[in-house]
Amino acid sequence: MAENINNEELCREEKISELEILKQSVDEQKKLVKSYYEQLLTLKADFENYRKRIEKQKKEIYEEGKSSLIIELIDVYETVKIAKKMIEVAKNHESVQEGLHLIEKKLHEMLNSHKVDKIATIGEKFNPLLHDVVGVVEKDDIEDDMIIEEVKSGYKIGNKIIKPAMIKISKKAKKEETETN
């Protein structure tokens, strides 16, 4: 019987020892979970701060771009005012033409400085990504869908289309077949 009691005490001590090990393991896991939770909260706060900072930077960049464009437009506006004065005192059409040429030149320089390119049109094949068809002209001597007239120019920056060109294209005249019996 003494042996049974010793065995039971041994089993009890082993169980207590196992429970203590499990309790330590649970405590370690709780600490690990708490650590992960704190890291998660920190990351969440960091991400929120990052998002706010990016929004602020985006607004600042937009405002800088807008200001830059407005400065260029002011320059064109001033050129228009000069041209207007030239037209008002003009005794001939050459001054008017010169004033309009100044405006066109200033706008062309502005577009070039922003790497804005004109979309090719006349003599090109119609491309729905680059061109808007506003008219069709019947021509038998030109291949179908060839651009024969540019109504308004189109523009792009790199591969991005800013404004498609408005064009007229050619179509061969439809020949009506008549049956003779």
Image: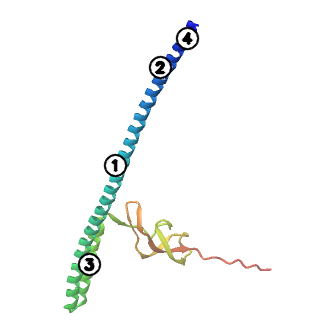
Separation of residues labelled 3 and 1 (CA atoms): 50 Å
In this picture, residue 84 sits left or right of residue 116: left
Q: Nearer the viewer, mark 4 or mark 2?
A: 4
Residue picked out by circle 2: 17
At x 25% / y 67%, what residue is drawn? 68
Q: Nearer the viewer, mark 4 or mark 3?
A: 4
Mark 4 or 2 closer to N-term?
A: 4
In the rendered image, the vertical position of residue 107 relative to residue 57, given as above or below? below
| Kind of residue indicated by mark 2 | Ser
Separation of residues labelled 3 and 2 (CA atoms): 93 Å
| Kind of residue indicated by mark 4 | Ile
Determine whether the residue tagged by mark 3 lies in a helix, strand or loop: helix
In the rendered image, the vertical position of residue 127 relative to residue 21, given as above or below? below
Residue picked out by circle 3: 103
Determine whether the residue tagged by mark 1 lies in a helix, strand or loop: helix
Question: Front-most of 94 and 141?
Answer: 94
**Relative image position of residue 162 (x, y in whole percent):** 40, 67
Separation of residues labelled 4 and 3 (CA atoms): 110 Å
Residue picked out by circle 4: 5
Mark 1 or 2 closer to N-term?
A: 2
